[in-house]
Amino acid sequence: MENDWKRLKVTGLYKQFSRGPVVLSNIDLTVDRGAFMCILGPSGSGKSTLVDLIAGFEPPTDGRIAFDDSPIHGPGPDRVVIFQDIGNALFPWLTVLENAEFGLKNFVRNKNERRAQAMEALELVGLGNDTHKFPSELSGGMKQRAQIARGLVMDPHVLIMDEPFAALDAITRRRMQYELKDLWERTHKTVIFVTHDITEALILATDVTVLSSGPEARILDTFRPELPDERDPADAEFIAAYRHIESLIGHVHDAGDVRAETAQ
């Protein structure tokens, strides 16, 4: 797949479903190639809707999404989505290796070449010795690694991850965060990662976008945390970045409470 793009640009994006309220309002977002962008916000802030629009699963009501000057219309192999539903994300009747190479069938005719690419991706995520297993034999963390490998094998422009670790226990989730950070550092793949967990965002991200609560969610801030590569939630810089995000979200919540009380 061609990789001569420089940035993903979202411009003037609005989304309204049918005659319901506006979900996203005037979203402008730039994701540079090679960035790890975390999209953070409270429940109901339109995070998943935003990545569905970027993935092409939903059309915007207004606005534009493009790789540089090439608009995005609908899904494509240049964007791969990793879902949080680890129970249904993999085909249960296929092995780990067969799952990983499944998406290549429409693009790579040679079976040996498909298998080699799938094996390379599985080695990257630490499943090189588990290729013969079926999803029912995998732990939750292994299932997510298999899903990530299936995405990487397509060599997409962007890997979109919608709260991929939400269904995991706390210990596995933290381990997967650091494994994903290591994988990103080795592959330099562009990642858009949705979360409502501030700590998770700051462990992973090169860039953070904070959405307000909905309806009519908007971007409160997009910034690059001034943090070292090795990130410790107990460090002063980490705590300062955490409090900055917390103050943004808390301020919007407080304003919403005031509006609600005024309306009563």
Image: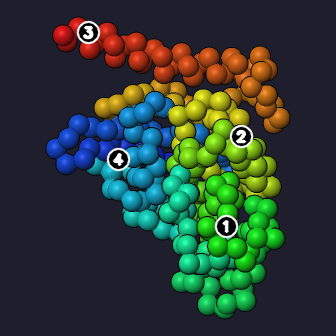
Within-10-Å neighbours for mark 1: few <14, some 14–19, many 20+: some
Q: Position of residue 6 (x, y in %)?
A: 62, 54
Q: Which mark is residue 137?
A: 1
Measured in 3D between alpha carbons, the distance from the residue under mark 1 to the one under mark 2, in whole angstroms, is 20 Å
Q: Are marks 1 and 3 in contact (CB under 8 Å)?
A: no
Rendering coords of residue 210 (x, y %): 51, 30
Tag in front: 1 or 2: 1
Where is residue 47? Give x, y as percent.
45, 41
Instruction: Note whether 67 is above or below 153 in the view shown.
Output: above
Q: Residues within 10 Å of mark 2 (few under 14, many from 20)?
A: few
Q: Nearer the viewer, residue 258 or 60?
A: 258
In the rendered view, does 229 fall on the left or right side of 174?
Answer: right
As measured in the structure, the alpha-carbon distance from the residue carrying label 1 to the one carrying label 4 is 44 Å
Name the amino acid type tagged 1: Glu
Which quarter of the picture shows residue 99? bottom right
Q: Quadrant of residue 264?
A: top left
Q: CA distance from mark 3 to mark 2?
A: 40 Å
Q: Quadrant of the N terminus?
A: bottom right
